[in-house]
Amino acid sequence: MSDSATTPAPDGSGPAQLPEPARPIAAGYAFTGPALDLGALLWDGVCHPEAQVRVPLPMLNRHGLVAGATGTGKTKTLQLIAEQLSAQGVPVFLADVKGDLSGIARPGQSGDRVSTRAAETGQGWSAEGFPVEFLALGGIGHGIPVRATVTSFGPVLLSKVLGLNRTQEQSLGLIFHYADTKGLELIDLKDLRAVVAFLTSDEGKPELKGIGGLSTATAGVILRSLTAFEAQGMADFFGEPEFDTADLLRLAPDGRGLVSVLELPAVQDKPQLFSTFLMWLLADLFHDLPEVGDVDKPKLVFSFDEAHLLFHDASDAFLDAITQTVRLIRSKGVGVFFVTQTPKDVPSDVLGQLGNRVQHALRAFTPDDQKALKATVKTFPDSPYDLEELLTGLGTGEAVITVLSENGAPTPVAATRLRAPESLMGPVDPAELDRAVRESPLYGRYAQAVDRESAYEKLTAAQAQAQAQAQAQPPAEAPKAPRAKREKAPAEDPSLVEQVVGSGMFKSLARSVGTQLGREITRSLFGTARRGR
């Protein structure tokens, strides 16, 4: 193997040094425009640095899949892609489940393994750190707190987090509708719990008949689910200030794309929560970004780690909403990479939209593994490789790749030895990470939680007012009043419902998300609320 450049074959099909079957593969990656360099072509176990495997920058909003067994290098592949996107002025969002992506902020460390990999792949490696913003769900862990209001999160995604069935999900939607129309702002979980508790109280039960026949039993199930959810410490994820997803689209002062790393190790034991929160971030971007069509480079590339958790036990309606969001967000300049173990973890309707594929090694130790391997092979175009054999024999940092070419056609399947990331391949020190968080321009905006007046406070105040009026003594009778002319009894106090719905207290406040009292919030495919920027 030689590291020197080679001349193209006379027919232009590829470098002359390559074996004949590999030349059309190499030619399929000879793009003329800007592209990310992923690695070098492998053929018969030999790495050919003169045959670079690349992905065109404009095609990265056509979505992608990074898959492979544990320990095969998926995280490093994401790091490699994020570095090159940032260098070309594209912001990136990374979900860091294991906590080892924070090193992208610091220059990497040279060594024999890095030098060898760089030589094998024809990479001019140099240590470099990249501009990073560290985020954390609800501020649990290291990072700028990412919170969502309950009303913005919406009933569909919240039902997924709470584990509600289809009927209960529909009932939760009615509760959101009721709160919207009555001006009861759902900011945090205690707001939603207060509304559900009111609707199941003696005073609120009549309201159930007016919002579509919500049963008391179902409302009770939702209330118990909310209470249990709060008891697990989930309340911190909902509230204000709500994270503005436009902050994911920023550039660093030097023009490089900002890499937003959502640190998730502190919530690893709550996979349903963080996967659904990732979907909220994506849905919120979808709501707010304008249509841009085909662009020279993406406005954002969003990685969705542990993607199988999102699809597990999802209803058909939920899957349809995911599919439509993924299909349509491409035209808004956002590319999405799903990260999971095998393609079968992703529904076929979603998988069919993932034009860029990086498949790391798979294991075939059990009958189920072998079945998954065969299913994975069927998702690739025809190839001169024996993919079943190849996918079980790939080493760490090697993958089978096919992407969309500059004209949108799939490239040939290419076994690839991937380049080494130039940033630190491991976590940074927690103290250093915390210091970076405190120095962030976002710290002052999001660090301190705010608990303003919303549904809980309004319902509590209305209930207290009703109790005070009920305990008030009736006025004393006038002296010497004839028995026949006794004054009429005081008019019956208005019910709690009437006070909650009609009091001036509600008419004086507008919803923080820009909606008016008495007008239902416009909601999306996922039931999430649209926000003004």
Image: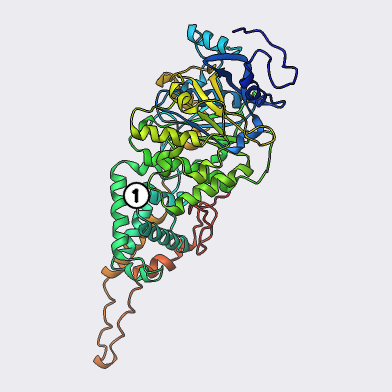
Looking at the image, residue 72 lies above or below residue 5: below
Screen quadrant of the N terminus:
top right
Q: Which residue is mark 1?
A: 163
- Left or right for 73, reference 290: left
Q: Establish if 228 lies above or below 53.
A: below
Image location (x, y in percent) of residue 450: 43, 43
Q: Residue 390: horizontal and vertical position, in percent?
A: 48, 24
Whether residue 244 is visible here, answered yes or no, is no
- Residue nearest the observer in this picture, 403 or 425: 403
Mark 1: which secondary structure? loop
Task: Answer with the quarter of the image where residue 148 lies.
Answer: top left
Q: Position of residue 175 (x, y in %)?
A: 40, 60
Q: Nearer the viewer, residue 339 or 384?
A: 384
* Left or right: 216 as drawn, with respect to 455: left
Looking at the image, residue 526 lies above or below residue 214 = above
Residue at 30% in and 82% down? 489
Q: Is residue 5 above or below residue 239?
A: above
In the image, residue 146 lies at what x, y percent? 45, 38
Identify which amino acid the numbered label 1 is placed on. Answer: Gly
The residue nearer to you, when weighing 445 against 101, is 101
Counting the numbered discs, the total is 1
Which residue is at the front of the view, 152 or 418?
Answer: 418
Q: Is residue 52 visible?
A: yes
Q: Quick check: 352 left or right of 341?
A: right
Q: Which residue is drawn at the image coordinates 34% and 64% (left, top)?
A: 199
